[in-house]
Amino acid sequence: MESMPISAIGRSTSRQFFHCRGFSLLELLVVVVIVATFVGAAVLSIGIAGDNRDLEQETFRLKSLLNLLREEALMQNRDYGVLFSATGYRFYVYDYVLQTWVEPAGDTLLAGRSVDGLLELALRVEDRDIVLDEEFETDELGNPLPQVMILSSGEMTPFEADVFRPFVEEARVSLRAELDGTIEISSGEPL
């Protein structure tokens, strides 16, 4: 049975022709909200929105290396030092024959470290703020003078080091070392 035209242009209003409509504005808005929710979740999960996992990892790495250095100082009866810059840190061993600080030869674990390009370091030694160079100076590397020392007795220079993201006030993790060698990590007040 054929449908009969009801207008001058010959169109019918039967049900078989209404299924070819487009999407409504409400349906499009629902899809946009769902896509925006997934994009927001993806951005947060990969850290673009500024989470502090990289700060915590960098601070934990420094703490682990300092604990290792303290154990080596006790076991090998050697004195170690740490020289900080705003973008990294280096480890040194005191050579009593040459009476100077030297880099540990062939020790890849104690090689110089750089923090992630978006992070910086701040240092306070014995309640005094230390102005750190942006990078290590080449003449400084010839005759280094570490700011932090780890002695063969197990004692350590008391200090606080902040790993932070510049221009973001809340993005800061602190590492605090005491004279007896205990080290604590906290998210706290800036230096």
Image: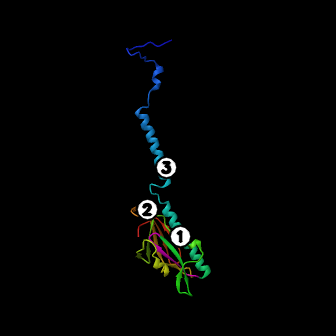
Relative to 38, is 101 above or below?
Answer: below
The earlier-in-sequence mark between 3 and 1 is 3
How far separated are the C-alphas under marks 3 and 2? 20 Å
Judging depth in this view, the residue of 122 and 4 nearest the camera is: 4
Helix, strand or loop at label 1? It is: helix
Amino acid type of disc 3?
A: Ala
Residue at left offset 49%, top offset 12%: 2
How far separated are the C-alphas under marks 3 and 1? 31 Å
How far separated are the C-alphas under marks 2 and 1? 18 Å
Q: Nearer the viewer, mark 3 or mark 1?
A: 3
Residue 147 seen in the figure: no
Residue under label 1, please give it: 63
Q: Position of residue 150 (x, y in %)?
A: 53, 79
| Magenta span contains residue 167 | no
Residue under label 3, please give it: 42
Helix, strand or loop at label 2? It is: loop
Residue under label 2, please give it: 171
Residue furthest to the front in view is 138
Amino acid type of disc 2?
A: Ala
Judging depth in this view, the residue of 47 and 9 nearest the camera is: 9
Q: Position of residue 10 (x, y in %)?
A: 41, 15
> Of the numbered discs in the image, which one, if any, rests on residue 100?
none
> Is the residue marked by circle 3 packed among few (<14), some (14-19), or many (20+) residues within 10 Å?
few
Q: Is residue 81 left or right of residue 122?
A: right
The earlier-in-sequence mark between 3 and 2 is 3
Residue at left offset 49%, top offset 61%: 54
Read off the magenta span.
78-87
| Magenta span contains residue 79 | yes
Q: Position of residue 185 (x, y in %)?
A: 50, 67
The answer to whether mark 3 and mark 1 are in CB contact below 8 A is no
